[in-house]
Image (cartoon, rainbow, N blue to C red):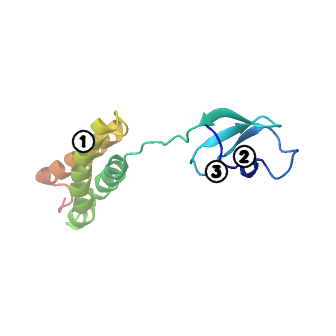
Amino acid sequence: MTDPNPASLQPASPSVAPGWYPDAGSGRTRWWDGTKWTENYHQASVVATNGFATASLVLGIIGFVLMGIPLFIGWFLGGIPDVLAVIFGILGISQSNRLGGVGKTSAIVGLVLGGVSLLSVFVGAGSIW
């Protein structure tokens, strides 16, 4: 690669330590060996995340804990997070398949917690004990 203006790529001070520095206009970092730029580039790494899986896990835990509150209060406080945990769990599993498995465990745990809490309504959880 030929630089249109090599002077613009030089560090401001000749005593700059060797290391990775931003390359003008390329969006990558380039290695400065202490005297000149090398042809070594480093692409910034991007970490894949799965927001649906995280949301499913958090909502599943919240719903699971709140569903045990008696006198129908648990249905209102725990039911909504449980329904959302199930929905986000399904979406999180789907998204994890596209991301190479990222967040699959969290999505499954959230889905199970939300589903178990919702099924517990049929045996009296959250109602008058």
**Label 1 neighbourhood size at 10 Å, few (<14), some (14-19), many (20+)?**
some
Identify the residue shown where x is 76% and y is 49%. Answer: 7
Name the front one of labels 1 and 3: 3
Task: Write down the residue under mark 2.
Answer: 6
Mark 2–mark 3 Cα distance, whole angstroms, equals 10 Å
Q: Residue furthest right?
A: 15
Query: Can residue 110 be seen?
Result: yes
Q: Amino acid at mark 1?
A: Ser
Residue 86 locus on image (x, y percent): 22, 50
Task: Write down the residue under mark 1.
Answer: 94
Residue 2 locus on image (x, y percent): 64, 39
Residue 120 locus on image (x, y percent): 17, 49
- Depth check: give the residue in front, 43 or 24: 24
- Depth check: give the residue in front, 41 or 127: 41
Q: Circle 2 sits in a helix, a strand or a loop, which is it?
A: helix
> In the rendered image of this protein, does residue 119 appear above or below residue 100?
below
Q: Amino acid at mark 2?
A: Pro
Query: Can residue 113 be seen?
Result: no
Identify the residue shown where x is 66% and y is 40%. Answer: 30
Task: Write down the residue under mark 3.
Answer: 24
Identify the residue shown where x is 13% and y is 50%. Answer: 123
